[in-house]
Amino acid sequence: VLFRSGSPDGTHVARIMITSGTIADSKYSSVIVRKVWSPTWKRAYYGSGYFQEGGPAEPYVHWADHTHLVIDYQHSEVEPSLCTNKVDNILVECRAHYW
């Protein structure tokens, strides 16, 4: 696990995880979400990821409010990303950036 972020009301937690490769060369990441009392994680995002020493640079994950998770990531034609619009009662907004 590289990053963990709790919702503002403390009911949910999101994690960014490496899904293949190593920290130095990984190109894929997952963002998973669960209620704090639940042992079951649900995937909100799977796709490109850029990691640097100390944690992930992308995707960038933050809570807009206690029911709205925002995931910013770099768009890739070669490595398509999958995003879920909703996990439980959490709205997920995935924003692809082109650069």
Image (tube, rainbow, N blue to C red):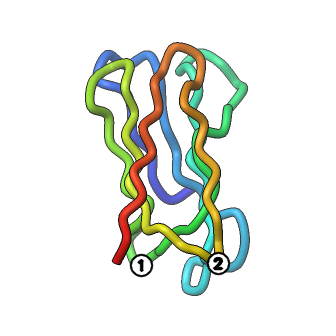
Residue drawn at the location 46% of the way across and 24% of the way down: 91
Q: Is residue 7 above or below residue 97?
A: above
Quarter assignment of residue 35: top right
Check the image and report above or below for 25 versus 73. below
Q: Is residue 87 left or right of residue 99?
A: right
Q: Amino acid at mark 1?
A: Gln
Q: Total marks drawn?
A: 2
Residues 26 and 84: in front is 84
- On the image, the x and y values in percent for residue 34 come to 59, 26
Q: Quadrant of the C terminus?
A: bottom left
Few, some or many C-alpha atoms within 10 Å of disc 2 (few <14, some 14-19, many ≥20)?
Answer: few
Q: Amino acid at mark 2?
A: Val
Residue 29 in picture, x, y percent from top left: 60, 61
Residue most toward the bottom?
Answer: 25
- The answer to whether residue 39 is left or right of residue 64 is right
- Which residue corresponds to the image point at 42% horizontal and 58% vertical from the top-left? 96
Identify the mark nearer the N-term, 2 or 1: 1
Q: Position of residue 1 (x, y in %)?
A: 57, 55
| Mark carried by residue 36 | none
Q: Is residue 30 left or right of residue 21?
A: left
Identify the residue at horizontal 59%, vertical 74% (top origin): 77
Q: Nearer the viewer, mark 2 or mark 1?
A: 2
The disc at residue 78 is 2
Mark 2 element type:
loop
Give the CA separation, mark 2 to mark 1. Answer: 21 Å
In the picture provided, is 25 more to the left or to the right than 92? right
Where residue 42 sits, quadrant-wise, is top right
Classify mark 1: residues with Cα within 10 Å, few (<14), some (14-19) or many (20+): few
Q: Residue at x 61, y 53 (%)?
A: 30
**Mark 1 sits on what residue?**
52
